[in-house]
């Protein structure tokens, strides 16, 4: 009977092992396919964006050509040569445009970017001519995408986009055509490294191929994956036959991008893992079989040992399975908590700063229009409350980012003296106003840390010392301690009781403020200091005596002073100019790309003669910024997107003096890319400001590389006006 139990246990274990292995392989295959679908949906999205940008640039060329044709007096040959030269110059700047030409109302060649005057040619039989010649009255048709022109193959030819020029009565006047190089798309696709079996292509909405990669690969348009009008945008990839395929319709263009990859190539890593899983399962089964045979042979003599071994195996299997489930549950809980923190952080950072920006602008306008001194006094108190709320929001978001572990750290070596001198300069006026002496002991030491994270630690400690000191002074200095450098902030303030030294680092804890006076802050400063120091690995210490004062200290890693610097070059002033990168990095992310705050200019016409383009999709924010700028004397062009902004600029034939844009805009377009696109169309580097609620160091770096300033919402109205005045100083002088 015991042998029967042993056989049953062995069969059960074998079935369990095989079942778990098969389930694991099946789930792995399902996860691999899901990941591949997401990746190819993202690939199609990238192709969509790339093709849209390329075609938008070509379409912009057509619009400019139509404007020139509308104004062209054909009796003036010099004007024709000028238009042809401009067409050729613009086409040469765009690698995807293989040529631009224009037809008259009968389909004859009128202008050609390749030569002028063009040879007499009748192109009325071409599909792009037929698309517009067939309509004699009525509104002009939308942009037409034609089939590829003759060439060695799809990958070596070109296709066309065209628009028609009609008069006020709808009569056809001319047709503008641009040839789009297929090789532009093929080369980009080939250099992107999509995989050996990847297939990428562009089709018209009528399923006619325009471009493909690899060249001449005979890619057929998909059937099940082909986008339909009722399909949601950005749908997942679809398994169609032996391929996994994603297709997207370009916004504004009758073109479909298709990305596909063989299932065999997608599942190759899964097959390798499945073989390993099968091998491991086979090894386990082989070992179990050997144990079973050995145990079965000695069953009569060692029944007790066999029974104990079986119980041990079952217990071990249960413990492993239970522990695995616990670890998986803990991992899921940690991932959900991290995602929840990130979602709350992103929502609060943008959605709460957005209305505060409008509130600040409308409040500034109300203060300027209020004739009653009492109303002005109430407005001043409202301003103080608004600033206090903004500071609390900034502190809460900083604390949330630290707790969520999403604060990046960029460690570098830099001199300490410029940072200390900068912080002392910020607080010197406040200290002198209280009759305090603020002293910074000179130092030539270099440290290794993240300047952008170290600066708020030292600023908070120094600000607290000035705030809580009524008489005497504050001293900041640095002392070597082994391999480190101990930066100390001494004050002669009220001191901290010994019982409270361990609780001052907690959130919302304040000494001597039981009534929660908002003017003294929210009690988050030292909590942020402690978490930031822990993130950087810098030990914090505090010593204090009630009635005598306190000493806060942070220990930093010390590095040797570069030998190439002379003693004269180690002065704080010289060091601050010798390492601009460290000085830039020491500023907080919200101020990296913004000029310093300037005093408010009371003159209402400080922006007189400037034309400011405001791009903001929120009507309330757009109206508040428009009123604020108009009151300062600026001419305002307001738009909810950069497409509308481009149309307004082209309609007025005037380039703006500056651009003030939100970062998040509808339709998948962001303010930074919109500014760069508009600059390219206008052909000039228009000064630009990004007004955003995003708290991202990556965004600040990208804006700095693009030559844009960043103001974090809610930005004070005076700061917006003074920044615009400084950026457009040359324009104002010219005006």
Image: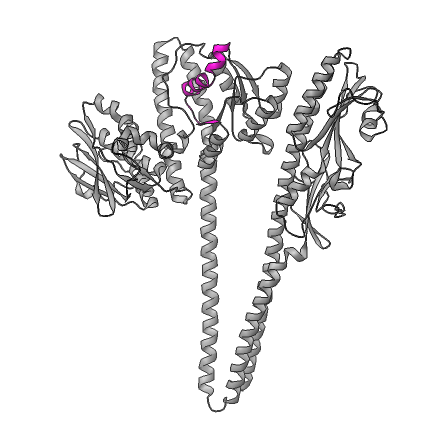
Total residue callouts: 0
In the rendered structure, the answer to whether residue 650 lies left or right of residue 338 reads right
In the rendered structure, the answer to whether residue 26 lies left or right of residue 398 reads right
Residue 729 in the image, given as x and y percentages of width and height:
46, 15
Decide if residue 16 is in sight here.
no
Is residue 722 highlighted in magenta?
Answer: yes
For this orientation, the residue located farthest to the bottom is 301
Residue 365 in the image, given as x and y percentages of width and height:
44, 15
Decide if residue 291 is in sight here.
yes
Q: Which quarter of the picture shows residue 485? A: top left
Image quadrant where one finds the N terminus: bottom right
Q: Residue at x 26, y 38 (%)?
A: 445
138 or 361: which is nearer to us?
A: 138
Q: Residue at x 16, y 32 (%)?
A: 492
Is residue 497 highlighted in magenta?
Answer: no
Position of 364 relative to 217 (above/below):
above
512 or 396: which is nearer to us?
A: 396
Residue 593 in the image, given as x and y percentages of width and height:
43, 28
In the rendered structure, the answer to whether residue 372 lies left or right of residue 257 reads left
Q: Residue at x 46, y 67 (%)?
A: 320
Where are the magenta residues, as a range? 708-735
Residue 174 in the image, given as x and y percentages of width and height:
78, 20
Q: Which quarter of the picture shows residue 140? A: top right
The secondary structure that dominates the magenta segment is helix
Q: Which quarter of the picture shows residue 59? A: top right
């Amino acid at each position: 009977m015991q042998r029967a139990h042993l056989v049953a246990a062995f069969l059960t274990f074998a079935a369990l092992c095989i079942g778990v292995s098969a389930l694991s392989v099946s789930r792995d295959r399902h996860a691999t396919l899901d990941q591949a679908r997401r990746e190819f949906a993202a690939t199609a999205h990238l192709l969509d964006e790339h093709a849209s940008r390329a075609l938008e640039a070509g379409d912009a060329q057509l619009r400019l050509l139509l404007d020139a044709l509308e104004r062209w007096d054909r009796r003036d040959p010099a004007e024709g040569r000028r238009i042809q030269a401009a067409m050729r110059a613009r086409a040469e700047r765009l690698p995807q445009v293989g040529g631009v030409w224009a037809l008259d109302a009968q389909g004859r060649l009128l202008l050609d970017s390749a030569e002028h005057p063009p040879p007499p040619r009748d192109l009325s039989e071409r599909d792009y001519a037929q698309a517009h010649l067939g309509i004699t009255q009525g509104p002009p048709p939308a942009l037409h995408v034609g089939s590829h022109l003759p060439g060695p193959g799809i990958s070596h030819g070109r296709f066309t986009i065209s628009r028609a020029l009609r008069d006020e009565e709808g009569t056809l006047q001319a047709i503008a055509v641009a040839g789009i190089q297929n090789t532009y798309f093929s080369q980009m696709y080939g250099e992107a490294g999509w995989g050996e079996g990847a297939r990428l292509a562009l089709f018209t909405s009528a399923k006619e191929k325009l471009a493909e990669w690899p060249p001449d690969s005979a890619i057929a348009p998909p059937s099940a994956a082909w986008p339909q009008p009722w399909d949601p945008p950005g749908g997942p990839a679809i398994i169609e036959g032996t391929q996994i395929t994603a297709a997207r319709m370009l916004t504004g263009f009758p073109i479909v991008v298709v990305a596909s990859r063989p299932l065999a190539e997608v599942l190759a890593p899964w097959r390798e893992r499945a073989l390993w899983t099968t091998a491991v399962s086979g090894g386990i089964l082989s070992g179990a079989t050997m144990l079973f045979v050995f145990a079965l042979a000695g069953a009569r003599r060692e029944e007790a040992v066999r029974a104990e071994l079986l119980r041990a195996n079952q217990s071990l299997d249960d413990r492993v399975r239970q522990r695995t489930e616990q670890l998986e549950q803990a991992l899921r809980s940690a991932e959900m908590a991290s995602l929840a923190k990130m979602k709350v952080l992103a929502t609060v950072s943008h959605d709460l700063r957005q209305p505060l920006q409008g509130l600040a602008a409308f409040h500034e306008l109300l203060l300027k229009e209020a004739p009653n001194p009492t109303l002005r006094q109430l407005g001043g108190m409202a301003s103080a409350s608004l600033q206090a709320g903004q500071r609390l929001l900034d502190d809460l978001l900083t604390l949330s980012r630290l707790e969520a572990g999403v604060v990046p750290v960029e460690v570098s070596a830099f001199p300490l003296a410029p940072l200390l001198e900068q912080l002392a300069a910020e607080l010197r006026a406040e200290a002198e106003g209280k009759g305090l002496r603020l002293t910074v002991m000179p130092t030539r030491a270099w440290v290794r840390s993240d300047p952008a994270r170290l600066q708020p630690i030292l600023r908070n400690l120094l600000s607290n010392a000035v705030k809580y000191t009524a008489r005497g002074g504050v001293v900041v200095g640095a002392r070597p301690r082994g391999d480190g450098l101990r930066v100390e902030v001494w004050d002669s303030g009220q001191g901290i009781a010994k019982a409270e030294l361990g609780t001052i680092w907690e959130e919302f804890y304040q000494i001597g403020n039981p009534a929660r006076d908002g003017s003294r802050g929210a009690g988050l400063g030292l909590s942020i200091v402690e978490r930031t120091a822990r993130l950087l690995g810098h030990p914090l210490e505090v010593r204090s005596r009630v009635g005598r004062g306190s000493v806060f200290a942070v220990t930093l890693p010390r590095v040797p002073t570069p030998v190439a610097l002379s003693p004269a070059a180690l002065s704080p002033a010289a060091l601050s100019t010798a390492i601009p990168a460290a000085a830039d990095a020491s500023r907080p992310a919200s101020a990296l790309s913004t000029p310093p705050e300037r005093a408010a200019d009371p003159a209402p016409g400080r922006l007189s003669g400037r034309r400011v383009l405001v791009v903001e999709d929120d009507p309330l924010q757009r109206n508040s910024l428009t009123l604020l700028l108009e009151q300062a004397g600026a001419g305002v062009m307001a738009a909810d997107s950069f497409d509308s902004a481009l149309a307004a600029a082209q309609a007025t034939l005037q380039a703006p003096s500056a651009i003030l844009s939100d970062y998040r805009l509808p339709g998948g377009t962001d303010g930074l890319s919109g500014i760069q696109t508009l600059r390219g169309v206008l052909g000039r580097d228009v000064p630009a400001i990004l007004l955003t609620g995003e708290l991202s160091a990556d965004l600040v770096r990208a804006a700095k590389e693009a030559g844009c300033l960043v103001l974090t919402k809610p930005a004070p109205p005076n700061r917006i006006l003074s920044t615009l005045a400084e950026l457009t100083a040359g324009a104002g002088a010219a005006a």
